[in-house]
Structures are given as structure tokens and as C-alpha cells.
């Protein structure tokens, strides 16, 4: 099978797929805490588990799961690795001297203990599975990330051995921050600042981490450590793929050291609206660092749209639905929903222990309907809201009491929250209200379970209830659908998940509407088999179309295209126009075509009609058009009246006005290139422009025949920042309200915003000129975004020798650049 790319791919993620397991013989007995006793008393570790233990089949008996008849049996948990303990850096709660002494003694054990590499239970498992699913299509792949454990206790010699072993045996390059750096980066800034805000949880507590500088400094420090490791091991041609919100500063740090590297960034969680993102103090630093990527990917269209709008409003950048124009390069924006590896999941489903757990669940809950859910115990996962909705379901649909059991698995997280107590209250209330001697409606487990048990729960379920308040994608819904291959039971899904957009056949709910969720449970339990099968088939098609393989392949393939399309990557690094080469090409040509923009190219912006610059320009153009081999056109965005007033007296000079709507051939009259144009959008645009004119000093509106322009000043002054912000707001206002309903485009100039019909472009007028003239030499010069389609059109022409030039250093499709208007005139003078 052919490779996606011959180049090495570097994947940067906070956690490596591997970590270290130290071999220490720890014979200490387990400690029973008040939390254990509280769980038993409240029913959170329920009788379900005791009965499951008694019914275990011989095929799943293992030595480490022996039980006695009177013991509490807990579900099998994922393997726990032996690693150094995490220190506490909280100022308020310092560890006691005795505890510190014990910890230091244990640290010495780790310093000298033998170790081995193990698969990590932390990190982005969806990303790891996606990359693993296409590993055979990659020529070379390395991972860069942390070990996911404290490392201060380890001597440098041990750290060096770990790094060498990981590189040699696993193609993994460990990043080893200090424990304090990691604590500040991950547990404080990532989890207490970025995670809540990106999930629409506004912080208002006195201890708001967002206002504490130390955590952001730690965030920067860890990002810098990643950059140092990647730069040290970078090879020319490598493709760098940076993942998730933990490493948002990394693309900028890499670009500083590796200016020509191919860098992609993918955000696995939601990107919030600009109104929330702008609350973050380092908002500009985060955005500017991300924008040093060549490609930025998101899970859904709405997340990408939020990012584009945020860049326009905070950084005043020129944006399109598919990318962002920077002064130095063009950033592509893509939508790549992550999925699962169905083949690998099915292989795990075939394991005997999965079937054993399924049989036990069926025996235990014979005659009962099972609703299954597994979520992190995190505010945004909506566990409490889900339990309240289930309570409403039992109240409003009493016929299901005693017939339905909700099994909720709640995974521990590092985020600070007070949900545990609130959830325990709901569990206790519902179970006390609706339980009887043989029935308990809610089974709540605050622990993780083995993957085999997880698959068994999804397979045995009659309904899966996935109702987060905000989620990037949520792959549990995908795994549930695959596990329901035989039974085809329905899925209830929150409309605030990324998966929501592609899962049209699920029962979609607002998790805040408890009655709606309750009614959806009733509908799911009452659904006939024919409807279940129809819905399941649609959901399964979506899973296959958006698989893990498709996700990883598409992103890496898009990054490969950047390498073969240098016009999109740091195109401001194009060479300056060599007049010697230009003159040589011109001297060997017989039919020459010159295409010039007007304002900002041939004359400075805001030029008056009788200025010295205009007189010089007219003299140069007079000389240029005298040569019978030359055809000269000035293609302007200005009105027909303005262009005619300034340049109309030059014989044999072709003119175009309003970005190609009007054309005046070299020896002819003005003509309109388009027929009937829809101008019904103009009142809406005028209203928006008027709103911002009233609030922006010295701004005014210009109405042309087919376009409307809002002019504003950008000169230095106390209100310069405010004016730039108003311009960005104005542009986004039009994009949000007018672009959705009308076929118009927005052209952001240096000191104006112009709205015109989408079909009117400079490439159309050039196509018309080419019908009259078949040149063997073309020189085109322009200075802003309205000229980019002209450059792109000319660069595709096969016959003539084409020179496309932009004025100034910026991202462009032009092949060359000229520094300023003065140099443009000097260049033309050198040709005549």
C-alpha cells in the first residue's frame, strides 16, 4: 500500500502513548478512607457489583479478582502503573513534615528502581487510535510528549536512559518539564482556565486562575520545552502536527526557529465564541501563536467559524470561510471530525471476557431496561443534569418505575469542581424515592472500569444517554453504535456535542431541558424495532464515513499539499522583482500586456487630482502606450467618473472601473461587462455602515454603482486602536448578517471595507481583455486583496511569460514583490 507521505511526521501531544512503570515491591495494605465508606453507605457502589461477582463465569476468573462471599467486589479497573507520587504546590495546604519525609523516602526508591515502558492510560486516546490505524501508510513517525508522571524524584541519569530507550524502541521523544511547571501548565492553566472557558463555563471565583500569572508562565514554559525537543530533532522536510489546547503556543515557538517548516495544529475541544475568548488576558498571544501554523483544524464548522471570527475581531485580520490572510503567510482552516477505528474496536469486542460480562449483565437485569452512560465527573459533562432529567422521567412516566435502571460511570478528573456532593444528593434522593427491596433505579460508580466491561455495558444497553453541556466530539457515541450492531438500540445525544451535526438519526436533546430529555428516554424505550434499525443504519454510515483513518489521513494529506503549494505558505517571502530579467523578457516579446491597479499601486492612497505624483504617472503611461507592441490597462476599484477624470485623457490607455464591472477598451467607449446585477443587499449594508460611521471618527460611506465602501482612517492617534477595532467589528457584522443571505463578497482594503456582488472580480475583466489580445508577455502589479484573483488567474496562463507583482511585503499569490509606489513608477520608467 502506498504511503501518504515519504516525509517524516512529528506528532506533538501533551502525553506520549507510552509511559514508565517502575518495578517496586510495595506490600502496603490498602487504606480504607471515609470516601470508601461513604460510597458504600450511599449506594454508589451498589449491590449490582456483588451479584455480578457471584455470577462470574469461569472463563473470566483471574487470580487478582478473587472474592469471598462476604466481600465487597469492585469492577475490574484499568491497570495502575507504579510511578512517583504527584507533589502538591498549593500555597494554602502544605504537606506535613512527616508526609514529606515519607515521600522523600519513596522517591529514593523510584530513583534506583528498575523500570519498563508501558502503554499510557492518559492522553488523547482518540488521536492515538487514529494515528495507529494508518501507521502502515506512514514512512516514518515520531511522537513528542510528556511521560504523564512526576519526574523531579528521578536523577538525570535515569531521565537520560528513559529518553534514549523511548527514542530507540518506540520512536517517542519525551519532554520532561519540572513537576512545578507541569502542575502550573496542566492542572492550573489548562484545566482551570482554558478548559472551562473553551467549554463556556465563565469563572467568577476569587481564586480565578486566569488572573494568576504563574500558571500562564508555566504554560509557556512547557510549550517552550516541546519546541526545544522538536527543534533539536527536526529534519528538513518533516511535517509537524501539533495537537490540542495544551500546546497552543507551540506553533509560534516552532516558527521562530524553523521558519520554513510545515506546521499543522488541530484543536480537539470546542473553540468558544469571540465574546468568551476575548476574556482571556493572553488572547492575542494565543491567537498569534496558533496562526503561525500552515493549517489549523477543528472538529466542526461552528468551532472553525468561531475561530475565524475571533481572529477578525481581536486581530483585525482579513479572513475568508476557508482561511486567514496574514502579512507573512496564508493559514488554511479545515474541518476534520475525528472518528473511531471500527475494525480495531470489533476485534476487542470479540474477546471472551466481553461476552462474559455481557452475560452477567443480562442475568442480573433480566426483564429490566438498561440506560448506560460513562462521563468524566466534570461540570461540562452534565452528569448532574442527566440524573435530574432521569428523575423527571420517572416522575412523568410512572409506568417505567421498577423497569428501568440507569448505570452511570463517572471518571475522576483533575479539574476543581464541587459536583461530587451535588451528584450524591441526587442519587440518594432518586434511589430513596423510587427504590424497593429488589430494585434500585440509579447505579452510580465513581471509578473507571476496564475496557472489556465498558464494551459489555454498551452492548447490553437498551439506551445510551450522552448529554454533555459542551463537548468537542464525543467518541463514546460512536463506540455505542458499533456495539449495537445486533440490537440497534437508540442513542440519545446532546445538541452541544460535535457529533450532533453528523448524527441526524439519534434522538437529539437539549441537556438543560430535563423534561425533553425525560421524554426522549420514554421515546427511546418505546421505539419499535423497525425504526431502531433504520436509525442505526444511518448512524453507522456516518461513523464509517468519518472514521479514525479518514481523520488522520486527511490532515496529514492536507499538510503534504502545503509543501507542494508554496504560494500558500509564507508567500511574502517571494523574491523582489528583478528588472533585468523583466527587461530581457520584454525585449524578446512582440505582444505585451500591462495590467496595473490604481490606488496604492500607481499612486498613493488619497491622491488629489492635480498632484505632482499624478502628473509623473501620466507622463510614464504616455510613454508606455506609445509603443505599438504595448497594451496598457489600469484596472481600478474606483468609480468610472474618478478614473476617467484622472486618466481619461491618455490616448490608447485601457481603463476599468469598479473592480471590473466597467471596461473602456484602448480605443472605445465605456461598457458594462455584466448584465442584471442583484443589488437588493445594499440597504442592509448601508444600515450597518451607517451604524459604524456614527461611532467612528472621520469615517464616511461611498456609494458606487454596484458596490458600497466604508472609509476610515488608520493614522496614529489616541483612538487608532479603537478605530481598528470598529473596522474589524464592522467587517464581521456584514459577514454574519449579509453574507448569509446574499451573494456578496467583502474586500478589506488598507483604509476601507468594500462590499460588492460576488461575481464581480478583476479576473473577469482580464478574461475579457485576453479575448481581444493574445499576449506573449504580461506584467501585472497590484497591492491589495482585490488583486489576488487577478494574480491567480494570470499565474495559470500557459502561453505568455507572466510577471505578477504585489506592492509591499504580504501574503500573496503574486510571484514577485515591489516595495512601494515609488519603486513601481521607477520600474515602469525603466521599461520605457
Image (tube, rainbow, N blue to C red):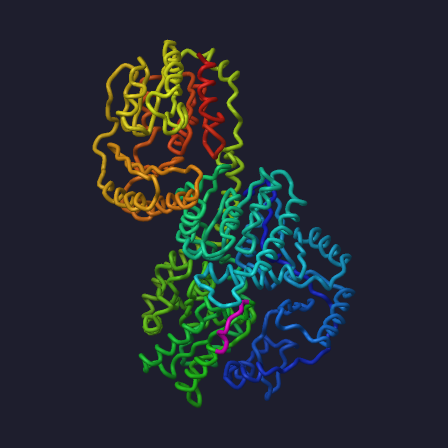
- The residue shown at (50%, 49%) is 284
Image vertical order of residue 807 relative to residue 693, above or below = above
Residue 813 location in percent, x, y? Answer: 45, 31
Give the residue displayed 46% in from the left and 77% down from the top.
422
On-image quarter of the C terminus: top left
The x and y percentages for residue 728 are 39, 45
Q: Magenta segment: does it hold 222?
A: no
Relative to the observer, which residue lies in front, 387 or 637?
637
Q: Is residue 687 visible?
A: yes
Disc count in the image? 0
Give percent across and percent down for residue 141.
61, 48
The one nearer the camera, 98 or 689, is 689
Nearer the observer, 253 or 752: 752
Which quarter of the picture shows residue 101? bottom right
Q: Nearer the viewer, residue 575 or 466?
A: 575
Against 819, residue 107 (above or below) is below
Q: Position of residue 678 (x, y in %)?
A: 23, 37
Quadrant where the N terminus is found in the figure:
top right
Task: Report the residue that reaches farthest toward the front.
Answer: 718
Residue reaching furthest to the bottom: 437
Residue at 36% x, 37% y is 752
- 135 left or right of 583 in image: right
> Residue 178 sits in which quadrant?
bottom right
Span shown in magenta: 415-421
> Is residue 816 in view?
no
* Residue 419 within the segment the image draws in magenta: yes
Amino acid at each position: 500500500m502506498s504511503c501518504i507521505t515519504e516525509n517524516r511526521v512529528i506528532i506533538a501531544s501533551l502525553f506520549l502513548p507510552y509511559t514508565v512503570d517502575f518495578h517496586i515491591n510495595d506490600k502496603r495494605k490498602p487504606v480504607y478512607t471515609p470516601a470508601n465508606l461513604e460510597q458504600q453507605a450511599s449506594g454508589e457502589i451498589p449491590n449490582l457489583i456483588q451479584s455480578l461477582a457471584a455470577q462470574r463465569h469461569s472463563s473470566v476468573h483471574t487470580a487478582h479478582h478473587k472474592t469471598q462471599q462476604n466481600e465487597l467486589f469492585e469492577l475490574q479497573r484499568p491497570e495502575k502503573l507504579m510511578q512517583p507520587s504527584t507533589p502538591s504546590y498549593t500555597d494554602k495546604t502544605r504537606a506535613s513534615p512527616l508526609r514529606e519525609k515519607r515521600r522523600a523516602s519513596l522517591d529514593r526508591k523510584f530513583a534506583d528502581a528498575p523500570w519498563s515502558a508501558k502503554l499510557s492510560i492518559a492522553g488523547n486516546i482518540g488521536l492515538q487510535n487514529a494515528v495507529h490505524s494508518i501507521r502502515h501508510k506512514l514512512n516514518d513517525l515520531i511522537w513528542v510528549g510528556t511521560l504523564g508522571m512526576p519526574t523531579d524524584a528521578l536523577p538525570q541519569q535515569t531521565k537520560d536512559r528513559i529518553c534514549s530507550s523511548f527514542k530507540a524502541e518506540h520512536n517517542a521523544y519525551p519532554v520532561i518539564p519540572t513537576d512545578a511547571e507541569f502542575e502550573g501548565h496542566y492542572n492550573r492553566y489548562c484545566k482551570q482556565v482554558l478548559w472551562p472557558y473553551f467549554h463556556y463555563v465563565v469563572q467568577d471565583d476569587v481564586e480565578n486562575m486566569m488572573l494568576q500569572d504563574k500558571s500562564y508562565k508555566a504554560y509557556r514554559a512547557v510549550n517552550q520545552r516541546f519546541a526545544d525537543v522538536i527543534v533539536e530533532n527536526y529534519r528538513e522536510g518533516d511535517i509537524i502536527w501539533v495537537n490540542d489546547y495544551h500546546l497552543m503556543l507551540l506553533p509560534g515557538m516552532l516558527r521562530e526557529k524553523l521558519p520554513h517548516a510545515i506546521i499543522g495544529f488541530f484543536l480537539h475541544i470546542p473553540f468558544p465564541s469571540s465574546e468568551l475568548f476575548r476574556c482571556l488576558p493572553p488572547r492575542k498571544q494565543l491567537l498569534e501563536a496558533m496562526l503561525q501554523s500552515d493549517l489549523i483544524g477543528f472538529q466542526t464548522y461552528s468551532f472553525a467559524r468561531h475561530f475565524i471570527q475571533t481572529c477578525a475581531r481581536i486581530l483585525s485580520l482579513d479572513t475568508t470561510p476557508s482561511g486567514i490572510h496574514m502579512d507573512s503567510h496564508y493559514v488554511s482552516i479545515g474541518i476534520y471530525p475525528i472518528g473511531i477505528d471500527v475494525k480495531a474496536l470489533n476485534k476487542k469486542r470479540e474477546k471472551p471476557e466481553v461476552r462474559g460480562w455481557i452475560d452477567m449483565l443480562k442475568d442480573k437485569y433480566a426483564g429490566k431496561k438498561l440506560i448506560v452512560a460513562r462521563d468524566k465527573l466534570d461540570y461540562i459533562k452534565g452528569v448532574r443534569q442527566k440524573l435530574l432529567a432521569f428523575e423527571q422521567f420517572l416522575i412523568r412516566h410512572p409506568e417505567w418505575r421498577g423497569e428501568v435502571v440507569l448505570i452511570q460511570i463517572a471518571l475522576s478528573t483533575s479539574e476543581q469542581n464541587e459536583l461530587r456532593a451535588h451528584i450524591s444528593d441526587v442519587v440518594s434522593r432518586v434511589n430513596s424515592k423510587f427504590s424497593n427491596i429488589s430494585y434500585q433505579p440509579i447505579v452510580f460508580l465513581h471509578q473507571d472500569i476496564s475496557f472489556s466491561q465498558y464494551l459489555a455495558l454498551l452492548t447490553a444497553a437498551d439506551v445510551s444517554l450522552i448529554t454533555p453541556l459542551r463537548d468537542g466530539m464525543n467518541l463514546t457515541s460512536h463506540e455505542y453504535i458499533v456495539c449495537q450492531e445486533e440490537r440497534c438500540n437508540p442513542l440519545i445525544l446532546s445538541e452541544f456535542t460535535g457529533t450532533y451535526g453528523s448524527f441526524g438519526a439519534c434522538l437529539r436533546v437539549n441537556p438543560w431541558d430535563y423534561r425533553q430529555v425525560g421524554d426522549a428516554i420514554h421515546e427511546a424505550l418505546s421505539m419499535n424495532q423497525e425504526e431502531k434499525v433504520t436509525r442505526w443504519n444511518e448512524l453507522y454510515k456516518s461513523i464509517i464515513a468519518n472514521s479514525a483513518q479518514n481523520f488522520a489521513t486527511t490532515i496529514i494529506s492536507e499538510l503534504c499539499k502545503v509543501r507542494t503549494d508554496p504560494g500558500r505558505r509564507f508567500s511574502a517571502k517571494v523574491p523582489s522583482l528583478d528588472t533585468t530579467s523583466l527587461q530581457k523578457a520584454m525585449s524578446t516579446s512582440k505582444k505585451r500586456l500591462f495590467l496595473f491597479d490604481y490606488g496604492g499601486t500607481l499612486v498613493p492612497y488619497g491622491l488629489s487630482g492635480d498632484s505632482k505624483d499624478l502628473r509623473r504617472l501620466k507622463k510614464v503611461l504616455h510613454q508606455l502606450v506609445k509603443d505599438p507592441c504595448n497594451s496598457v490597462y489600469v484596472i481600478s476599484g474606483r468609480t468610472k467618473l474618478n478614473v476617467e477624470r484622472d486618466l481619461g485623457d491618455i490616448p490608447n490607455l485601457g481603463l476599468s472601473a469598479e473592480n471590473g464591472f466597467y471596461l473602456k477598451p484602448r480605443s472605445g467607449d465605456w461598457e458594462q461587462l455584466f448584465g442584471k446585477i442583484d443589488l437588493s443587499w445594499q440597504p442592509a449594508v448601508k444600515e450597518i455602515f451607517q451604524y459604524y460611521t456614527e461611532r467612528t471618527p472621520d469615517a464616511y460611506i461611498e456609494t458606487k454603482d454596484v458596490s458600497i465602501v466604508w472609509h476610515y482612517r488608520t493614522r496614529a492617534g489616541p483612538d487608532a486602536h479603537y478605530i481598528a477595532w470598529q473596522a474589524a467589528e464592522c467587517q464581521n457584522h456584514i459577514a454574519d448578517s449579509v453574507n448569509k443571505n446574499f451573494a456578496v463578497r467583502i474586500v478589506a482594503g488598507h483604509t476601507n471595507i468594500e462590499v460588492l456582488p460576488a461575481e464581480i472580480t478583476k479576473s473577469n475583466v482580464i478574461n475579457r481583455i485576453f479575448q481581444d489580445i493574445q499576449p506573449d508577455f504580461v506584467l501585472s502589479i497590484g497591492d491589495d486583496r482585490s488583486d489576488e484573483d487577478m494574480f491567480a488567474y494570470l499565474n495559470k496562463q500557459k502561453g505568455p511569460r507572466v510577471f505578477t507583482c504585489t506592492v509591499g511585503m504580504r501574503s500573496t499569490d503574486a510571484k514577485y514583490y515591489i516595495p512601494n509606489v515609488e519603486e513601481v513608477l521607477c520600474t515602469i520608467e525603466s521599461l520605457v
